Image: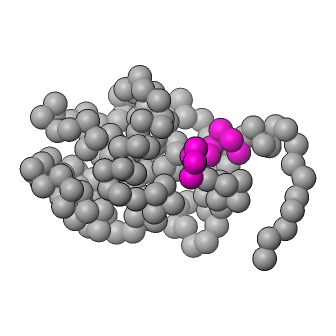
Protein backbone atom coordinates (compact mmCIF):
# COMPACT_ATOMS: atom_id res chain seq x y z
CA UNK A 1 0.00 0.00 0.00
CA UNK A 2 1.27 3.50 -0.80
CA UNK A 3 0.44 6.79 0.85
CA UNK A 4 0.85 10.30 -0.47
CA UNK A 5 2.55 12.83 1.77
CA UNK A 6 3.49 16.49 1.51
CA UNK A 7 7.10 17.41 2.20
CA UNK A 8 8.94 20.70 2.48
CA UNK A 9 11.46 21.92 -0.07
CA UNK A 10 14.36 21.26 2.31
CA UNK A 11 13.29 17.62 2.75
CA UNK A 12 12.93 17.24 -1.03
CA UNK A 13 16.46 18.65 -1.47
CA UNK A 14 17.77 16.25 1.16
CA UNK A 15 16.20 13.28 -0.65
CA UNK A 16 17.60 14.41 -4.00
CA UNK A 17 21.07 14.77 -2.46
CA UNK A 18 20.99 11.16 -1.28
CA UNK A 19 19.35 9.66 -4.36
CA UNK A 20 21.05 7.68 -7.08
CA UNK A 21 20.05 9.28 -10.40
CA UNK A 22 17.81 7.08 -12.54
CA UNK A 23 17.72 4.45 -9.78
CA UNK A 24 16.00 5.81 -6.69
CA UNK A 25 12.56 7.05 -5.85
CA UNK A 26 11.88 9.15 -2.72
CA UNK A 27 10.61 5.94 -1.13
CA UNK A 28 13.80 3.94 -1.83
CA UNK A 29 15.98 6.79 -0.53
CA UNK A 30 14.02 6.91 2.72
CA UNK A 31 14.14 3.13 3.09
CA UNK A 32 17.90 3.11 2.64
CA UNK A 33 18.55 6.05 4.97
CA UNK A 34 16.18 4.79 7.65
CA UNK A 35 17.44 1.21 7.33
CA UNK A 36 14.01 -0.24 6.62
CA UNK A 37 13.37 -3.81 5.38
CA UNK A 38 15.82 -5.78 7.46
CA UNK A 39 18.96 -3.83 6.68
CA UNK A 40 21.63 -4.95 9.12
CA UNK A 41 23.44 -1.61 9.18
CA UNK A 42 23.67 0.09 12.54
CA UNK A 43 20.99 2.64 13.29
CA UNK A 44 22.47 6.10 13.05
CA UNK A 45 21.59 9.67 12.41
CA UNK A 46 19.99 10.13 8.99
CA UNK A 47 22.02 13.22 8.25
CA UNK A 48 25.48 12.29 7.04
CA UNK A 49 28.71 14.17 6.83
CA UNK A 50 30.68 12.83 3.88
CA UNK A 51 33.73 14.92 4.71
CA UNK A 52 34.00 13.34 8.19
CA UNK A 53 36.23 10.61 6.75
CA UNK A 54 39.45 11.84 5.27
CA UNK A 55 40.61 10.70 1.87
CA UNK A 56 43.60 9.07 3.53
CA UNK A 57 41.36 6.48 5.18
CA UNK A 58 40.28 5.07 1.83
CA UNK A 59 42.65 2.27 0.77
CA UNK A 60 44.83 2.59 -2.30
CA UNK A 61 45.48 -0.16 -4.79
CA UNK A 62 48.17 -1.02 -7.28
CA UNK A 63 47.92 0.78 -10.61
CA UNK A 64 47.87 -2.64 -12.24
CA UNK A 65 44.29 -3.02 -11.02
CA UNK A 66 41.66 -1.56 -13.36
CA UNK A 67 40.09 1.70 -12.18
CA UNK A 68 36.69 -0.01 -12.03
CA UNK A 69 37.98 -2.67 -9.63
CA UNK A 70 39.78 -0.10 -7.49
CA UNK A 71 36.66 2.03 -7.15
CA UNK A 72 34.46 -0.96 -6.35
CA UNK A 73 36.87 -2.15 -3.65
CA UNK A 74 37.09 1.35 -2.18
CA UNK A 75 33.29 1.51 -1.93
CA UNK A 76 33.17 -1.95 -0.33
CA UNK A 77 35.82 -0.91 2.21
CA UNK A 78 33.92 2.21 3.22
CA UNK A 79 30.66 0.29 3.58
CA UNK A 80 31.89 -2.88 5.26
CA UNK A 81 34.80 -1.55 7.34
CA UNK A 82 33.73 2.00 8.19
CA UNK A 83 29.94 1.59 8.20
CA UNK A 84 29.03 4.08 5.48
CA UNK A 85 26.04 3.70 3.23
CA UNK A 86 26.72 2.91 -0.41
CA UNK A 87 25.78 6.47 -1.35
CA UNK A 88 28.18 7.96 1.22
CA UNK A 89 30.94 5.61 0.10
CA UNK A 90 30.32 6.46 -3.54
CA UNK A 91 30.58 10.17 -2.78
CA UNK A 92 33.80 9.70 -0.80
CA UNK A 93 35.43 7.66 -3.56
CA UNK A 94 34.37 10.24 -6.14
CA UNK A 95 35.74 13.05 -3.97
CA UNK A 96 39.05 11.21 -3.47
CA UNK A 97 39.44 10.66 -7.19
CA UNK A 98 38.12 14.02 -8.34
CA UNK A 99 35.36 12.43 -10.41
CA UNK A 100 31.58 12.57 -10.41
CA UNK A 101 29.72 10.14 -8.12
CA UNK A 102 27.83 8.88 -11.18
CA UNK A 103 31.17 7.67 -12.60
CA UNK A 104 31.70 5.49 -9.53
CA UNK A 105 28.11 4.24 -9.66
CA UNK A 106 28.63 3.35 -13.30
CA UNK A 107 31.67 1.28 -12.35
CA UNK A 108 29.92 -1.00 -9.90
CA UNK A 109 26.57 -1.15 -11.67
CA UNK A 110 27.87 -1.74 -15.19
CA UNK A 111 30.85 -3.93 -14.30
CA UNK A 112 28.80 -6.17 -12.06
CA UNK A 113 25.68 -5.94 -14.25
CA UNK A 114 23.55 -4.90 -11.29
CA UNK A 115 21.29 -2.00 -10.39
CA UNK A 116 22.00 0.19 -7.36
CA UNK A 117 19.44 -1.55 -5.14
CA UNK A 118 21.02 -4.91 -6.05
CA UNK A 119 24.42 -3.56 -5.01
CA UNK A 120 22.88 -2.53 -1.68
CA UNK A 121 21.66 -6.10 -1.15
CA UNK A 122 25.02 -7.50 -2.18
CA UNK A 123 26.78 -5.28 0.36
CA UNK A 124 24.45 -6.54 3.08
CA UNK A 125 25.35 -10.17 2.33
CA UNK A 126 28.35 -12.13 3.47
CA UNK A 127 31.55 -10.76 1.95
CA UNK A 128 32.32 -14.14 0.38
CA UNK A 129 29.43 -13.66 -2.08
CA UNK A 130 30.84 -10.29 -3.11
CA UNK A 131 34.35 -11.70 -3.35
CA UNK A 132 33.24 -14.52 -5.65
CA UNK A 133 31.33 -12.11 -7.88
CA UNK A 134 34.36 -9.84 -8.21
CA UNK A 135 36.68 -12.76 -8.90
CA UNK A 136 34.35 -13.89 -11.65
CA UNK A 137 34.32 -10.46 -13.34
CA UNK A 138 37.95 -9.52 -12.68
CA UNK A 139 39.49 -12.98 -12.96
CA UNK A 140 42.91 -11.62 -14.00
CA UNK A 141 43.11 -9.71 -10.72
CA UNK A 142 42.11 -12.43 -8.27
CA UNK A 143 45.25 -11.84 -6.19
CA UNK A 144 44.31 -8.19 -5.58
CA UNK A 145 40.74 -9.21 -4.69
CA UNK A 146 41.92 -11.99 -2.39
CA UNK A 147 44.37 -9.67 -0.58
CA UNK A 148 41.71 -7.00 -0.19
CA UNK A 149 39.16 -9.36 1.37
CA UNK A 150 41.85 -10.81 3.67
CA UNK A 151 42.48 -7.28 4.99
CA UNK A 152 38.77 -6.55 5.18
CA UNK A 153 38.26 -9.28 7.76
Residue 55 rendering spot, x and y as whole percentages: 40, 28
**Please, what is the dominant secondary structure of the magenta stretch?**
loop
The furthest residue to the top:
98
Q: Is residue 90 above or below residue 85?
A: above
Tell me the quadrant of the picture where the N terminus can be found. bottom right
Given residues 44 and 60, the one toward you in this image is 60
Rendered residue at 80%/43% (across/down): 11
Q: Is residue 146 left or right of residue 55?
A: left
Rendered residue at 12%/55% (across/down): 139
Q: Find residue 104 and report its image quarter.
A: top left
Residues shaded magenta: 15-23
Q: Is residue 38 magenta?
A: no
Q: Can see residue 34?
A: no
Tell me the quadrant of the picture where the C terminus can be found. bottom left
Residue 47 rendering spot, x and y as whole percentages: 67, 43
Rendered residue at 56%/52% (across/down): 23
Q: Find residue 13 and report its image quarter.
A: top right
Q: Is residue 16 left or right of residue 6?
A: left
Q: Can see residue 121?
A: yes
Say how many tags the image has.
0
Rendered residue at 25%/62% (across/down): 133
Residue 111 rendering spot, x and y as whole percentages: 31, 50
Q: Find residue 134 and report its image quarter.
A: bottom left
Q: Is residue 5 above or below residue 148?
A: below
Q: Is residue 16 magenta?
A: yes
Residue 129 rendering spot, x and y as whole percentages: 29, 68
The furthest residue to the bottom:
1
Amino acid sequence: MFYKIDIDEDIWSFLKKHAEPFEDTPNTVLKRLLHVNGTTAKARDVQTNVSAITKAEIPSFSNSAPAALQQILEVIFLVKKLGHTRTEATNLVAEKRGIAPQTVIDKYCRQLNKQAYEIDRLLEEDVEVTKMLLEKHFFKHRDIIHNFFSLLR
